[in-house]
């Protein structure tokens, strides 16, 4: 029977036809001919067999599917091997938010055997379908996947939707099914095109026809290319060749010099696609001036980025996500890439890019400019930063500048001008904000025509599958198909498999799909953890400090917990967000009672007080404050944390006069109080919060980091300015309050412990003992830590759902505990005799004293309860503390946890 082609058949259905045979294999004579005549390809083979230029080859963190092993350099087999590589890689990975990309093992095994297993219960077929008709020449309407399970049949379209069901055929009949056999299912006529292996179904690959399949796109493009290889290879447009003047095709830097960093040479497939004019192949070598400074992981990162944006990792895709943890130098890796691509290229040395657009949060625009200057000086690359006085037009008119740095906000305002400029490379810093494809910024950036797109983010990107899709689809549009098919094929099975009620079958399917997704995307996502730079960083001492609340605080806390509002919340009687108001009040109280006082007064004076929900919370509260209470006179004794803070600042000032402190809060009103205290003690301070004009931010940061600055304290609002800032001028960081989201706190903490820091770093997280702050901390470390799910920066308490049980726990004050968190750890120690003891003294079997050397804080992910248990911990009553700073605050502290990283010297 003749038939018209279904959509996929126009491109070739991989499940019906033999796999795509690459040009090199299908036509060896052509390949031989080309190799013979093109000396550069020969050179490629030789160069590929040397490993001088490919450091990523041996690195376990780099997914090196396309790297030029001797074999792969000789064959044009990118597309052909892709599926096998994915299959094999998928077995190695899970969809872990912290996963790094692994290299493939040497042997590739495809489980073909499974396809032939006679006793397999479920069968899968690729089919085409149409409405029933008697016509001889059918007009097939689409491709589909037929699932046969016993006697029941399900027909799914390539978006994963059910489009037909039926009952009646026998599985055995289908085992004999041959290509071309037709049958009726669910009111549709189908023709069987071939058998799909369980592997291909389980991984979801059988749905990846057309736009979503890297396999197809690769074979498709290669086919297109191969259709007339000689046209491009042997008949170059010599005019263009000579006009461009690339005959002098020496690498810009010596690829054989010691420590040279040489990029992967394009394979034959790539050459067919991109070297139509047959320029000689030239090694792309990163400027040794930069290489000299690069850390090993940064070299790997540059190789990775280069291969992604050159389309060498996934054919026809030019995007990448560099998701290295904070402080790993993503900026420098990008600068190195830009500088390399702007001056060099593999084809005749012709530069790959001319103009680059960098979009970044406002507070980092000048940081980018500074980093360009720091690594390349002011002469090599001319960067243009957009601000009120420097508009995009100026950049567009000038041939002088090649890099435009703009904030996300400015981008929206100047979108039309930006669109009129041809950018060859787009970098979105702190790009996790693009995870929401509905927001204006994302749609604006999607509308730019630039294909080479890089997202930089320190925040893990795989915690929400839809957000993950948005990020992937931004850098490599269409690679996962449409959102609806992605949902059906990946998201739904993965989510179902993680539910406790999931069947074994559902679990397996979900795991396979997750592995496949990781495999597909792992080619262009790279994440390394902080551990890779630990060895370049100084000692870090992290402390969790449980501060005893002041007497007024305790009294007010009790009063709040007895309020009608809290009682109603616990009975589930109040609606909506009333529990958030209660939580907010308790948090304010923990920071300082005067904050609560001001709130109550403010509400009392408002005209809507009588109807206000907060009345139920604040009623009678003012009577607890002294009659002459003045919220403007900040009394330290009233807040346990403030007392500890002022002693801590005094200790640093006295014991380490050359060192500085970064003081972080989520609230500007709290920062006001802290600023007041600084003033009281004559500590010079500077401040960055949401109100700080963007144009001044870098200046403030630079001022603080300068060794000539007299500022002792940097007051930082973590929400406003936490991301991306380098505050290495400070070596003590105090987190005055806690956020629900561990990512916010982690972001803030990594501002000081980063490359360039000279002093040992001390981090103090202050929590008020027995209060809601401890509960939030426990939530951070138990829920998120244990489940491994990492929340990201945009999630706030409004997104958190609480059960009545959880609210009960939140709204309890533990007045008699030194540390509720320690009580929960189920630790045998009393907190009395473990002060600063060394590992040798306390055997590892002891529950609570594994000591610093045992602690491997390998990443910035939230700590888990069990990890916390391994930290040193001791009560504040200890008299023989070895840490001089803790000794000074001991009196107001009920309990400490301490962890030391990189200990080589004493504190
Ligand atoms: N190889 C290096 N040698 C010395 N300093 C470096 C090196 N690489 C980066 N740095 C410095 O480390 C600091 C952190 O780098 P960068 O701001 O690029 O980190 P990041 O990965 O973007 O982190 P974040 O996610 O917090 O934005 C910068 O001051 C940078 O100049
Ligand atoms: Mg950064």
Image: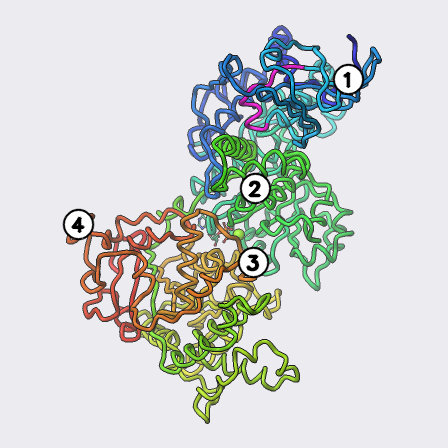
Q: Residue 863's spot in the image, x, y percent?
A: 38, 53
Task: Work out whether residue 514 or residue 854 is closer to the camera in this orientation and state it.
Answer: 514
Highlighted range, magenta: 193-204
Q: Is residue 262 visible?
A: no
Residue 22: horizontal and vertical position, in percent?
62, 15
Q: Earlier in the sequence, mark 2 or mark 4?
A: 2
Which residue is under mark 1? Answer: 5
| Residue positioned most to the top | 29
Mark carried by residue 799? 3
Which quadrant of the view contains residue 611? bottom right
Residue ID for mark 4? 843
Does residue 458 sit above or below 175 in this rendering? below
Q: CA distance from mark 4 to mark 3?
A: 43 Å
Examine the rendering and report whether any part of residue 76 can be seen.
Answer: yes
> Which circle's residue, 4 or 3, is located before the other in the chain?
3
Q: CA distance from mark 2 to mark 4?
A: 44 Å
């Amino acid at each position: 029977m003749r038939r018209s082609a279904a959509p996929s058949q126009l491109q070739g259905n991989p499940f019906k036809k033999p796999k795509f045979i690459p040009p090199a294999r299908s036509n060896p004579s052509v390949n031989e001919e080309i190799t013979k005549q093109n000396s550069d390809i020969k050179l490629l083979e030789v160069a590929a067999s040397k490993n001088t230029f490919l450091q990523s080859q041996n690195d376990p963190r780099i997914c090196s599917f396309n790297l030029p092993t001797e074999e792969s350099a000789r064959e044009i087999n990118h597309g052909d091997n892709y599926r096998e590589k994915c299959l094999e890689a998928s077995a190695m990975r899970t969809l872990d938010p912290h996963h790094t990309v692994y290299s493939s093992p040497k042997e590739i095994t495809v489980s073909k055997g499974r396809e032939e297993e006679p006793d397999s219960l479920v069968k899968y077929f690729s089919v085409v379908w149409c409405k029933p008709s008697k016509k001889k020449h059918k007009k097939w309407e689409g491709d589909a996947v037929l699932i046969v399970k016993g006697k029941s049949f399900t027909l799914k379209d390539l978006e994963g939707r059910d489009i037909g069901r039926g009952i009646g055929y026998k599985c055995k009949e289908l085992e004999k099914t041959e290509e071309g056999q037709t049958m009726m299912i669910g009111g549709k006529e189908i023709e069987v095109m071939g058998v799909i292996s369980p592997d291909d179904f389980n991984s979801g690959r059988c749905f990846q026809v057309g736009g979503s399949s890297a396999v197809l796109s690769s074979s498709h493009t290669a086919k297109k290319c191969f259709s007339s290889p000689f046209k491009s290879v042997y008949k170059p447009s010599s005019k263009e060749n000579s006009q461009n003047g690339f005959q002098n095709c020496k690498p810009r830097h010596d690829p054989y010099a010691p420590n040279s960093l040489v990029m992967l040479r394009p394979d034959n497939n790539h050459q067919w696609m991109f070297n139509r004019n047959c320029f000689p192949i030239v090694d792309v070598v990163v400027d040794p001036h930069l290489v000299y400074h690069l850390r090993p992981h940064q070299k790997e990162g540059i190789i990775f980025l280069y291969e992604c944006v050159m389309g060498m990792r996934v054919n026809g895709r030019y995007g990448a996500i560099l998701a290295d943890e904070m402080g790993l130098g993503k900026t420098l890796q990008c600068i190195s890439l830009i500088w390399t691509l702007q001056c060099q290229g593999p084809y005749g040395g012709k530069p790959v890019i001319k103009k680059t657009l960098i979009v970044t949060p406002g507070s980092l625009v000048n940081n980018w400019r500074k980093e360009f200057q720091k690594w390349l000086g002011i002469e090599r690359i001319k960067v243009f930063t957009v601000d009120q006085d420097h508009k995009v037009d100026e950049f567009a008119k000038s041939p002088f500048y090649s890099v435009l740095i703009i904030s996300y906000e400015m981008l929206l305002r100047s979108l039309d001008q930006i669109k009129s400029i041809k950018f060859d490379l787009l970098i979105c810093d702190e790009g996790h904000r693009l995870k929401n494809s509905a927001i204006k910024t994302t749609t604006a950036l999607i509308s730019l025509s630039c294909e080479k797109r890089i997202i930089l983010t320190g925040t893990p990107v795989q915690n929400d599958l839809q957000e993950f899709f948005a990020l992937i689809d931004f850098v490599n549009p269409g690679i996962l198909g449409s959102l609806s098919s992605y949902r059906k094929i990946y998201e739904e099975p993965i989510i179902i498999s993680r539910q406790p009620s999931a069947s074994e079958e559902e679990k397996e399917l979900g795991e396979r799909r997750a592995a496949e997704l990781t495999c597909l995307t792992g080619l262009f996502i790279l994440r390394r953890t902080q551990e890779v730079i630990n060895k370049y960083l100084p000692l870090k001492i992290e402390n969790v400090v449980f501060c005893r609340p002041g007497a007024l605080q305790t009294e007010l806390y009790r009063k709040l917990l007895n309020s009608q509002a809290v009682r109603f919340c616990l009975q589930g009687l109040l609606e909506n967000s009333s529990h958030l108001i209660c939580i907010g009040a308790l948090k304010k109280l923990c920071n300082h009672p005067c904050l609560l006082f001001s709130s109550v007064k403010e509400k009392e004076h408002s005209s809507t007080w009588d109807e206000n929900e907060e009345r139920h919370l604040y009623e009678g509260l003012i009577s607890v404050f002294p009659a002459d209470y003045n919220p403007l006179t900040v009394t330290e004794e009233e807040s346990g944390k403030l007392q500890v803070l002022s002693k801590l600042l005094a200790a640093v000032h006295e014991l380490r006069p050359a060192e500085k402190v970064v003081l972080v809060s989520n609230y500007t009103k709290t920062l006001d109080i802290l600023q007041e205290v600084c003033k009281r003690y004559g500590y010079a301070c500077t401040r960055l919060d949401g109100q700080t004009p963007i144009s001044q931010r870098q200046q403030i940061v630079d001022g603080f980091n300068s060794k000539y600055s007299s500022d002792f304290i940097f007051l930082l609002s973590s929400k406003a300015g936490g991301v991306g800032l380098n505050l290495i001028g400070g070596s003590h960081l105090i987190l005055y309050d806690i956020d629900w989201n561990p990512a916010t706190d982690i972001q803030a903490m990594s501002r000081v412990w980063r490359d360039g820091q000279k002093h040992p770093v001390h981090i103090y997280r202050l929590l008020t003992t027995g209060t809601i702050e401890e509960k939030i901390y426990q939530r951070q470390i138990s829920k998120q830590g244990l489940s491994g799910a990492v929340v990201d920066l945009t999630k706030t308490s409004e997104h958190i759902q609480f059960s009545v049980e959880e609210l009960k726990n939140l709204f309890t004050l533990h007045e008699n505990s030194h540390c509720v968190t320690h009580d929960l750890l189920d630790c045998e120690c009393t907190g009395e005799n473990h002060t600063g003891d060394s590992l040798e003294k306390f055997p590892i079997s002891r529950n609570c004293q594994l000591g610093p050397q045992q602690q491997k804080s390998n990443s910035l992910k939230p700590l888990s309860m069990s990890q916390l248990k391994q930290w040193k911990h001791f009560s504040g009553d200890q008299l023989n503390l070895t840490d001089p700073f803790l000794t000074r605050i001991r009196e107001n502290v009920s309990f400490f946890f301490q962890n030391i990283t990189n200990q080589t010297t004493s504190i």
